[in-house]
């Protein structure tokens, strides 16, 4: 598939939506203009059941008009699009460049919004032919903790949902959908600040103090042994000490050292084990040297855990809706994604949509000031989302909730 081969009748609308959202990017928790635009465009498509669970999000239900078989509870399939932009000044070059200085859609969430509107258009036309409900979740604040997904789950948007569908545009070949075939798609991201307290003293008289710089140095080296000695080689886990702050005076041993650590895991048990190891190891080293350690944990979102049946569905629907060779299988990613909170509530799948790679003229990755994707990918994503939602309504999952 090349960009010029795309003749999809959905494309003009998708491009119009995408470019409007791209030109008016808004930061996490400030997506009021984007949310209002989404609502306006949904109403133009005839969607009426729209709510605002939080000020800058929108949730819309599209109910099928076909009667459901007697005694069968109509299913609910949810599709999620995140809407927020990043505090990244956009590189020049597009004639629909961001009009908000310092803010841009560098993660491609403009594509996600446009594709979910496209799915809405398809589903509104399909209404006579399905029973059940497709819930469109236009989520705020994916990029900033604590994240919009957690708030929307707390607001009840996942109540009654039988399955939930997620997607992200990335640097894969244009129009490819890559299905991660192992359940853990993304990582849990946790941060901890460890403060090591020693006893300050004159640099020439170390015997009179307890050196937190020396303790901290030993801690940093030891932290790198946690994964290799505690986590199965088959599992993904990273422990990265990323900040080391101590001392300001060159002839004094300071009182304290502060170490910032970022931890990524896919397995929930590994997450707990690493948490415990980090504390035990730092406390042990500090105390062995006469100091003490204190911890301040900043828990991030958990890993996105997909449902095995939803993985199979996603792959089958991708194969059915895409040209031959465009449905791919692969691994997930080492970054985090708050879609995990939705995936905790219902069987979920999460796939990567190719927006173009280096060979196709799209060298920059998500979050780069010049991140771009091919708009030719938009109809692929919109059609995939709508098709997978309909597949769930027509053939309920056997795994259930
Ligand atoms: Zn991002
Ligand atoms: Zn993103």
Image (cartoon, rainbow, N blue to C red):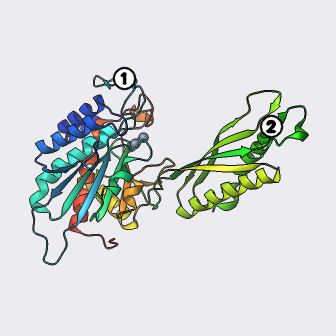
SS category of the residue bearing label 2: loop
Left or right placement of residue 94 versus residue 249 in this view: left
Label 1 – label 2 distance at C-alpha: 46 Å
Q: In which quarter of the image is residue 195?
A: top right
Q: Measuring from the top left, give residue 328's x and y in whole percent.
A: 39, 53
Q: Residue at x 16, y 40 (%)?
A: 41
Residue under label 2? 200
Q: Which residue is drawn at 16% across and 53% down?
A: 123
In the picture, which quadrant includes the C terminus? Answer: bottom left
**271 vs 182, nearest the viewer:** 271
Left or right placement of residue 106 versus residue 66 in this view: right
Q: Quadrant of residue 227?
A: bottom right
101 in relation to 397, above or below: above
| Front tag of 1 and 2 | 2
Q: In which quarter of the image is residue 129?
A: bottom left
**176 vs 169, nearest the viewer:** 169
Q: Measuring from the top left, give residue 393's x and y in whole percent.
A: 22, 65
Q: Please count the marks in the image.
A: 2
Q: Does residue 334 appear anywhere in the picture?
A: yes
Q: Measuring from the top left, give residue 52's x and y in whole percent.
A: 24, 48
Left or right placement of residue 171 versus residue 209 in this view: left
Q: Measuring from the top left, give residue 192's x and y in whole percent.
A: 60, 48
Q: In which quarter of the image is ligand 1?
A: top left
74 in relation to 59, above or below: below
9 in relation to 25, above or below: below
Q: Does residue 325 appear anywhere in the picture?
A: no
Numbered label attached to residue 56:
none
SS category of the residue bearing label 1: loop
Numbered label attached to residue 101:
1
């Amino acid at each position: 598939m090349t960009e010029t081969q795309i003749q999809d009748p959905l494309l003009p609308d998708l491009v119009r939506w995408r470019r409007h959202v791209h030109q008016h990017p808004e930061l996490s928790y400030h997506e009021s203009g984007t949310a209002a635009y989404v609502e306006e465009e949904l109403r133009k498509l005839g969607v009426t059941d729209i709510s605002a669970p939080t000020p800058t999000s929108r949730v819309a239900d599209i109910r099928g008009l076909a009667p459901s078989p007697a005694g069968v509870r109509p299913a609910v399939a949810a599709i999620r699009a995140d809407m927020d932009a990043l505090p990244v000044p956009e590189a020049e070059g597009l004639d629909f460049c961001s009009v908000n200085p310092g803010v841009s859609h560098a993660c491609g969430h403009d594509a996600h919004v446009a594709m979910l509107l496209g799915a809405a258009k398809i589903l509104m036309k399909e209404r006579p032919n399905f029973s059940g409900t497709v819930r469109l979740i236009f989520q705020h604040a994916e990029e900033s903790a604590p994240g919009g997904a957690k708030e929307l789950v707390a607001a009840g948007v996942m109540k009654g949902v039988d399955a939930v569908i997620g997607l992200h545009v990335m640097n894969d070949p244009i129009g490819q959908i890559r299905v991660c075939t192992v359940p853990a798609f993304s990582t849990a991201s946790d941060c901890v600040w460890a403060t090591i307290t020693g006893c300050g003293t004159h640099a020439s008289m170390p015997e009179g103090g307890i050196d937190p710089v020396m303790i901290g140095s030993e801690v940093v080296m030891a932290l790198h042994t946690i994964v290799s000695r505690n986590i199965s080689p088959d599992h993904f886990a990273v422990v990265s000490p990323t900040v080391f702050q101590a001392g300001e005076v060159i002839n004094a041993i300071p009182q304290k050292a502060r170490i910032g650590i970022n931890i990524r895991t896919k397995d929930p048990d590994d997450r707990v084990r690493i948490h415990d190891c980090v504390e035990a190891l730092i406390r042990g080293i500090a105390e062995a040297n006469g100091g003490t350690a204190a911890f301040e944990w900043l828990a991030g979102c958990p890993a996105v855990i997909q449902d095995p049946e939803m993985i199979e569905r996603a792959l089958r629907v991708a194969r059915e809706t895409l040209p031959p060779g465009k449905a791919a299988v692969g691994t997930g990613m080492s970054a985090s994604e708050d879609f995990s909170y939705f995936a905790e509530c219902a069987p979920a799948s999460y796939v990567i949509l190719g927006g173009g790679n280096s060979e196709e003229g799209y060298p920059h990755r998500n979050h780069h000031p010049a991140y771009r994707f091919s708009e030719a990918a938009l109809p692929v994503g919109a059609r995939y989302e709508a098709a997978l939602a309909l597949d769930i309504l027509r053939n309920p999952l056997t795994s259930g909730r």
